[in-house]
Amino acid sequence: MADAAAEVMVQEERQAAGPPGVLRDRFIIRSNQPLAHLSAPNAEAFSAEDKRDPSRKLYALICRPELPPRVNVMRALKGVGAAGLQQLVEWGPMVWPPLGRQCMTVVYERPAGERAMAHLKAEMRRIDEFDITRKVIEPAVLAIKELTARGITHRAIRPTNLYYMDDKGERLAFGDCVTVPPAFDQPSVFETIESGMAMPIARGGGTFADDLYSLGVTLVFLLLGRNPVAHLDDEAVLRAKIQQGSYSTLVGDARLPLPMIEVLRGLLCDDETQRWDIESLDLWRQGRRLSPLQTRGEKRAARGFPFQGKEYFHCRELAVAMARNWELAIPPVLEGKLELWLRRAVEDKERAQAVSDVVRNALSAISDKRAAIDLMLCKTLTILDRSAPIRYKGFHAMPDGIGSALAALVAQQGDTRLIIEMILREVPKLWFEAQGDARPDTSMRESNFRELRGYLSQTGMGFGVERCLYEMNDALPCQSSLLGEQYVVDLKELLPALNEAAAKREDLKAWPCDRHVAAFMGARARSDIDRNLLSLSDPDAGKGLMALINLFAVYQYRLGPESLPSLAGWIGALAEPVVNAYHSREQRKELAKELPKMVRRGSLVEIYTLLDNPNARQKDQTEFAWAQAQYQAAEEEIRRIHGDEEERERGVDRIGKQTAAVVGIIIGMVTTTIVVIMTVW
Amino acid sequence: MAKRPAKPSAAPAKGKDAGVNKVVLLVIAAALVPFSLPTVTILAATMLPTLGAYFSERGSNRYAWLCIGGLNFSGVVPYLFSLWFGVHTVDEALRLLSEGNVLLWSYGASAVGWMLYKATPPVVSAWLTMTNQHRVSGLKAAQRKLVEEWGEEVVRKTPAA
């Protein structure tokens, strides 16, 4: 009886949860079977089943629509079977019944055990120095090597994302790293000081050095069996790391085996250039002992800089405080107090001079003083701590994290003005200049921001903030409302999605292209289509539509599919201005007769060829000009005929009299001739 | 020092030439008078309507003397021939004039010429009006066809290049 009741309840639950989601016609994601123990902070886990192999243990993570997932990393990791990574089996957009919309879904191999640490405040089973190399470091090294070989980073290495993959607790692997932007879910304790200063959404992809740092912190947690800084909040952890260094903050007085001290000092080194790389870790793993790194902290000032009721002895710490209190930080810098402190207390004349120059330039700015002062503070903060993220009016981001921050803001319909202002005022350039290193990717990234600035300075369709959004997030799905809930990541998916949207649409008066669709095409096209995009905003609606049909036709020709009847119908319904661009009524009738045939065939290519026939258009223009001239000539002649009455009467009188004179002369000549003839004969 | 006045234009010289030609013609005509006095007598008496038409008409379109002259001459010419091929004397000329037929025919023909001269302009005017109307309706039909074929925009003037 009780069993039957339970079964009924389960069935009711299933019905309430709705039907399961199906990914790529193969993986069934059961919305009524959530797996809370496998959920990520921003992606819920559900039981998944492979139709081809139902015995396979899988689970799926459903991404939150408002956060841009790491599609590039998904592509790179699909099917990769590295020892220290959960295998990413499949990924893709899927209609998720509980939300009633498409969501990015990632299917992973399901761990048999629990996660190593349930949450950051929890105690966990310690892993001793003998096991940790075999169970954690070795697979982690293999995983990071695999990731590095594929040019990607994990950015989610932490004990709460480390799973026992077998029942015996022998095999450990890191979990998901693709459902959210890089390091978004990472508590700042697992991030380097620099990354920890950035907003979680804007930490950027980083490098393998960031992953190794996170691994170092994870090792400390696993060795201690607890979070050594559980009593501190993120801000306090960051402050402690800046003041004491990461190793001292995390390890403190804890007694750790000597070999582990060596590896932890190497991995937790705050100077990225000195931090152990994967080769050093590999050498250590193979038994070669390296001398432990001695962390060299930042020079402490002789006296503190008073700011907001506190005294700061380190430039980096002061920069953090100033960045958090933007408006209040401006006066002491402008008054020269900071320069004086750097010169006398820190005894860093170079930095003092740099700050002095920056302040002087800002004060001598003629136009837009406010902008000059904001840029001055931004430069000053970079001088104080050049490896810190870009900090501008409360927005703290790594250069490669600005894209994901913008994507999140757009998805949440937030205010993007600050990011736009940063790009327009070339704030990233200031940051790149301050780095002073000549890495090849630096100039490339700098030129990318220059391009973005160019896009922002143009307001037409295909440019502006939308273009920046897709340029900075090369795997972001198109956010256009025209596409409804469809998930379009690749250009080849755009036309089929628009075709589907057109089939459902009743109002076909709006264009099948908005700012998002145009920007998406501009960013995802392999060739430069900016000239075509500029034509989209042509004041002549016909020209604009032709530019759009041209783009769509090219994509249909190159990427397919062959038939898009609904989209063709939508275009056909809008084609009136293009047809009316022909002057000849005969030509218009001809086009109006041909167009429906092509719409039925669903060929945008044929529609474009029909509407954009340069010879016919040229002929139409020439003949129209000729017709206009003819009309004007007729008009002129009518005017002349109806011209001045008096003049006309004078003319008629003259002609009449001339006629009479001619008749008279002729009569005279004829009479004379007759008389001559009669007289002679 | 004052500038010299410009040379007189060519137009007055041309007018002067025309006057000289007329004088030359009159002199030649006067020289012929002794050899054809009977003819001159007939013409002087019968061609008076033409002379009158020449001097009476005003304005720029002075064609009456040509029309009346043509008919006037056609009334005289049979008598001139009878004179030339008959007895070509002043007496014969005066006899012909005294018969009255000569004057009747010549003046009658002049009257017909005058009527012709008066009647032709209205006829020509009516004919021209008719042809113009026909032309205008033809042009308007052509314009309507252009509008049908190219729409109202064909009416717009093409901007100057």
Image (tube, coloured by chain):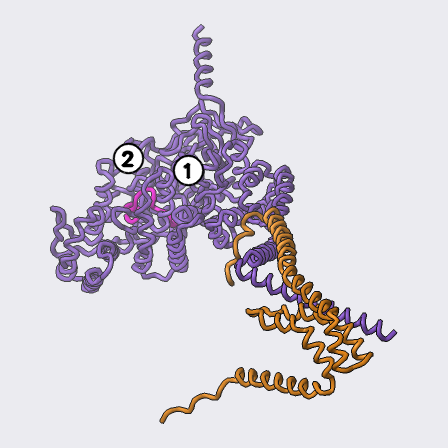
**Does residue A196 show up magenta in the picture?**
yes
Looking at the rendering, the stretch of residues picked out in magenta corresponds to: A192-208
Q: Residues within 10 Å of mark 1 (few under 14, many from 20)?
A: many
Amino acid at the residue labelled 2: Arg
- Where is residue A69 drawn, in percent x and y? 42, 40
Q: Which residue is mark 2?
A: A226
| Residue found farthest to the top | A1
Q: Which residue is mark 1?
A: A179
In the figure, the shade used to draw chain A is purple
Decide which of tag 1 and tag 2 comes sooner along the chain: 1
Dot 2 falls on which chain? A
* Distance between the alpha carbons at the discs numbered 1 and 2: 26 Å
In the figure, the shade used to draw chain B is orange
Q: In the displayed structure, does residue A139 sit left or right of residue B103?
A: left
- Where is residue A648 drawn, in percent x and y? 56, 60
Q: In the displayed structure, does residue A438 sit left or right of residue A492?
A: left
Amino acid at the residue labelled 1: Thr
Query: Measuring 51% from the left and 62% from the top, which residue is drawn there?
Result: B160
Picture mark count? 2
